[in-house]
Image (cartoon, rainbow, N blue to C red):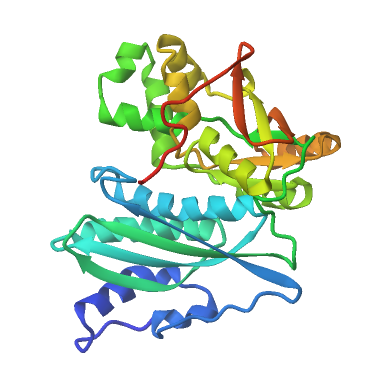
Amino acid sequence: MSRPDDTMSAEDRLIAKYFRPLATDPGAFGLIDDAAVVTPAPGRDVVLTTDGVIAGVHFFPSDPPGGIGRKALRMNLSDLAAKGATPLGFLVSVALPAGTDEAWIAAFAAGLGEDAKRYGCPLLGGDTDRTPGPTSISIAAFGTVPHGAMVRRSTAKPGDAIVVTGTIGDAALGVLLQREQKLGPRLGLSDAMVAFLMQRYLLPEPRNALAETVLHHASAAMDISDGLAGDLAKLCRASGVSAEIDAGRVPLSDAARAAAAADPALFETILTGGDDYEIVLTLHSERLPSLRAAAKAAGVPVTEIGRIAAGEGARFLRGGQAMTFARPSYSHF
């Protein structure tokens, strides 16, 4: 990396010091150009996705900056995983309020770089700005799949099994605990349970280890960012099908199960709250044993929760009765 000199602006020095070390792909040109070049392998398509986070909307201003950087990237990696894509690289645009401490920037870039290396997804370029509003970070990530093989949300078929990865609702409960410090003790949660739920909000675990399995098994898939109930409904609308879910089979962590037992109203939050960054996928039921074996080898838990059928909408059944939700999905509008 070239050494910053006196002819560089403060913005150029910031980029050179904190972000250029993340741009390890040759096509990034060390972040000294206005654009980057990526060349996918022959016979592969480029998959593109973008997601952003804003202080006060997607994260608390007091959240650790390194975790904010990692979460922003992981949100996009989760999208790539649900498409069966292998990460290729990403662009980042950062808008910071005047007076942002350089230590904050250093920690943010360090966290971002840690996960860029961990997931094999180098920085390719981006933009830095000052904003009169809150801190805003936007990432566009790129991945590759074999030509024509990207897993879509519009290709679920009646008779398909519905499967989710991991556990559902932890992050939504973590947000509640962050907002109300006395909620954990009131629910009878141990300190370890509170810490677990908070960590699931602060740092999601994108299921990129399962991307190839999704690619070869799923008829349709998407990542769960706005809540299982709402995102499954989106998949059903796109595919022109319906879904029937046994709510009792939705996988919960011990902490989430304890919270819902103490306050049954929280079960709706678990199903609709968002920020899970797990994958919901559909597949032919005959492929379930193969999926389970591959997921076990990848170290990712998977649970069958229902079936795709003809019709419209996604129904969650509890004790044989259809559930209704006051707010079926997280929405910005």
Q: How many marks?
A: 0
Q: Residue at x 67, y 41 (%)?
A: 281
Q: Residue at x 69, y 40 (%)?
A: 241
Q: Residue at x 49, y 43 (%)?
A: 225
Q: Residue furthest left?
A: 99
From the viewer's perspective, is residue 111 above or below residue 270? Answer: below
Q: Residue at x 41, y 79 (%)?
A: 31
Q: Residue furthest front?
A: 311
Q: Is residue 78 left or right of residue 66?
A: right
User: Residue 25: where, in percent of width, then height?
Assistant: 53, 75
User: Residue 67: where, in percent of width, then height?
Assistant: 37, 48
Q: Is residue 252 left or right of residue 158?
A: left
Q: Residue furthest bottom?
A: 7
From the viewer's perspective, is residue 132 above or below residue 64? Answer: below
Q: Is residue 209 visible?
A: no
Q: Which corner quadrant of the image does residue 142 belong to?
A: bottom right
Q: Is residue 203 visible?
A: yes
Q: Is residue 227 left or right of residue 307?
A: left
Q: Which corner quadrant of the image does residue 18 belong to?
A: bottom left
User: Residue 314: where, in percent of width, then height?
Assistant: 61, 32
User: Residue 218: where, in percent of width, then height?
Assistant: 74, 46
Nearest to the observer: residue 2 or residue 144: 144
From the viewer's perspective, is residue 324 above or below residue 71? Answer: above
From the viewer's perspective, is residue 159 above or below residue 146? Answer: above
Q: Is residue 235 left or right of residue 75?
A: right
Which part of the image, by quadrant, shows the N terminus? bottom left
